[in-house]
Image (tube, coloured by chain):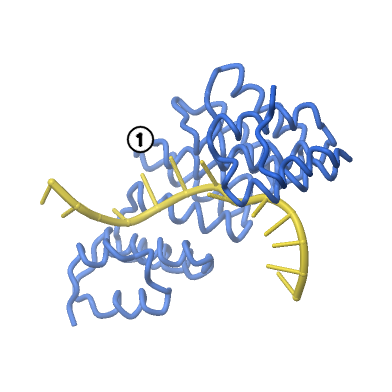
Amino acid sequence: VNVGNTLLAMYTKCWSPREGLFIFNNISSHSVVTWSALIACFADHNYGLQALEHFERMQSQGITPNLFTFSSVMKACGSLGNLNYSYHIHDLFVRSSLMPDLVIGSTLVDMYSKCGNMKDARQVFDALESRDLVSWGALISGYSMQEDAVGALELFEKMEQQDIKPNRVILLSAIKACGSLKAVRKGKVVHNHVIESGLESDLAFGSSLTDMYAKCGSLGEVCKVFKGLQNPD
RNA sequence: CGCAGGACGGUGU
């Protein structure tokens, strides 16, 4: 069977690593696109080691990684929590002379966060030339995952100051941080963002808000969330 | 003209 790059590219996310590898093995000629698609497939399914292995193999075939390759390998480093390889891939990227884009930027932030290295995550974030909600979200949920609720809320407030509207992912992390800090006042502010964004009916917020208010000891607010009441004022 | 890469909460296991 010979499957074209286009087909490979189209369905990467639907395939298990097993299927992805099978398809890859049945393609007669490989390019950076087919290699990257395979590595992305591994990375997506938390097969970090296989992603790194195949990245090494790709390089040994003399194929030069592109932005797609790098972002997938960085994602694999994050899921493995492999800080050494993270430094390695970051270094390779810098020396590649590829121009970093938004995806690379937030992937790096996420990679260092998942390795537990918030210092580098923050440094990358601060150095980004442009940021979108994913970049912000990667760092905020990084702080949140590392149980640095203060860091998460500080960043959230920085967003508010810049009038950047938080999205679902960011709000979820902020709510979690408010719960850890028992910051009920801030929690209500975040709750208002949720309402303004029309996300109250999202079931994820029901349980996160309930958890947050419960940790804050605000049982009245818990009831309101349950009844799906809007904030009167 | 399509076409491969990025952040995900609570609970339980």
Picture quadrant of residue A112: top right
How many marks the image carries: the answer is: 1
Label 1 Cα neighbours within 10 Å, binned few <14 / some 14-19 / many ≥20: few
Identify the residue at horizontal 71%, vertical 30% (top origin): A153
Per the rendering, the colour in which chain B appears is: yellow
- Along the viewing direction, whichever of A214 and A221 lies nearer the viewer: A221
Q: Chain of mark 1?
A: A
Q: Identify which residue, A134 or A195, lies in the foreground.
A: A195
Q: Which of the two residues, A168 or B4, is positioned nearer the viewer here?
A: A168
Tell me where residue A33 appears, x and y as whole percent: 27, 59
Q: Residue at x 33, y 49 (%)?
A: A66
Q: Quadrant of residue A27?
A: bottom left
Q: Amino acid at mark 1?
A: Met
Residue A119, by quadrant, is top right
When the figure is inspected, residue A85 is found, relative to residue A181, above or below; the finding is: below
Chain A in the picture: what colour? blue
Where the C terminus of chain A falls, by quadrant?
top right
The residue to which callout 1 is attached is A99
Q: Secondary structure at mark 1?
A: loop
Is residue A73 toward the left or the right of residue A195 in the image?
A: left
In percent of width and height, residue A92 lies at 45, 47
User: Is A18 located above or below residue A80 in the figure?
Assistant: below
Q: Quadrant of the N terminus of chain A?
A: bottom left
For this view, does A125 lie left or right of residue A73? right
Vertical side of A41 occupied by A122: above or below: above
Residue drawn at point x = 36 percent, y = 61 percent: A59
Camera-side residue of A14 and A19: A14
Q: Position of residue A196 (x, y in %)?
A: 56, 29
Q: Position of residue A222 (x, y in %)?
A: 79, 43
In this picture, residue A46 sits left or right of residue A172: left
Q: Residue lying furthest bottom in this view?
A: A1
